[in-house]
Image (cartoon, helix red, strand yellow):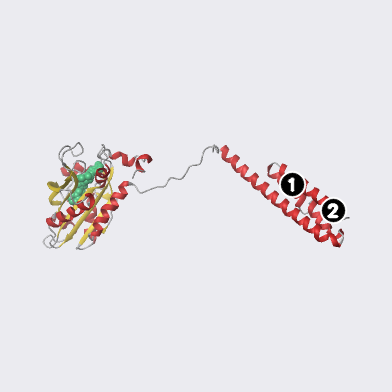
Amino acid sequence: MDGPGLQADLKRLEEEGQAELDAAKGEGQVQAARTKYLGRKGLLTQFLREMGKVPPDQRPAIGRMANEIKANLEERAEKALEKERSRQKAEALLKEGVDFSLPGRKPQRGSRHLITQVTEEIVTIFERLGFEVSEGPEVELDYYNFEALNFPKDHPARDMQDTFYFSPNMVLRTHTSPVQVRVMESRKPPLRIIAPGKVYRHDSDPTHSPMFHQVEGFVVDREVTLADLKGTLEFFVHQLYGPGVQMRFRPSFFPFTEPSAEVDIQCVICRGEGCPVCKRSGWLEILGSGMIDPEVFRFVGYDPEVYSGYAFGLGVERIAMLRVGLNDIRLFYENNFQFLKQF
Ligand code: FA5
């Protein structure tokens, strides 16, 4: 065997191998071509095995060339297999109805829901005043939701908070006030608690949702007075809406507070002039509050002669709606991305 003849043979082998690998269709043909040239009994393998017959002075050059060709064919075979595998994958996806001609979809960046943002803002204001966060269950015993809050069975005050019953003794809670009872039952004063969460009522219209959010706050200690409640809420309102916003207490009724008051703020839309949002009154109701009724203390075993306390409960949706000028509460829960991504 002479050198130039061997080199020509090798070159031909390489060209044929390349052509066969390039033309191979399907995994089977690619594997067959690979075996034909590179397998244990493959043409190139045989050639390498017969290197002994090559004159010694030409062996290095021929050997190098044969190894380069081997590497080249290996690489081509690998690429052909890879191409074939992705073709198979694409075919399978196409069968499932995936259309590759569509432009890619950029993942959308998410953000916290406005209700979550407002809840966190409210909670943070109270945390700065030394309140501690506590939570209660959404599926609640009638005892905590009503009974221990001084709503006796068949009392008309229950009508205002009709809800969903799992059984005569178990309801979806209608407010966050049951957290008051649960915390007081398990701890001793002094207490300074803020309790955010979901609540449920048999309600549905543009300003009332069957599921909505409240934040409850309450303080129990010796000598807590109505002045403490008023000062705390005034601080809160000014933090939330700015120092110039007026606030007023309006007498009200809740079975678990005495006296009770609803708190209104000066309409943030018209600044008290009167507009459709505040029904021309210049005021907007934002929460219910009062001094904790001694009757509730009796339920949890506190001595009303020693301790006093205040409580308040606000609707988060209401505050969020006023914040962004919304007039339909249902927009919060329709999962409309165009709406949600504004906040
Ligand atoms: C209560 O729920 C009392 N637990 C508040 C309270 C706590 C009073 C502590 C005294 C002491 P009320 O039913 O008014 O009160 O509800 C409070 C707020 O929840 C309302 O001002 C309103 O903003 C909001 N709210 C009530 N029903 C709905 C509803 N269906 N959808 C959205 N928000 C509502």
Can you identify the residue that label 2 sits on?
6
- Front-lying residue, 285 or 238: 238
Q: Secondary structure at mark 1?
A: helix
Q: Is residue 225 depicted above or below 273 in this figure? A: below
Q: Secondary structure at mark 2?
A: helix
Side of 99 where 195 appears, left or right: left
Separation (CA) of disc 1 from disc 2: 18 Å
Please tell me in which quadrant of the rendered image residue 195 appears. Answer: bottom left
- Mark with earlier residue (1, 2): 2
Q: Is mark 2 within 8 Å of ligand 1?
A: no
Say which quadrant the C terminus sits in.
top left
Q: Is residue 315 visible?
A: yes
Q: Position of residue 263 (x, y in %)?
A: 16, 48
**Mark 2, residues whose alpha carbon is within 10 Å: few (<14), some, or many (≥20)?**
some
Can you identify the residue that label 1 sits on?
18
The three-letter amino acid code for the residue at tag 2 is: Leu
- Front-lying residue, 337 or 66: 66
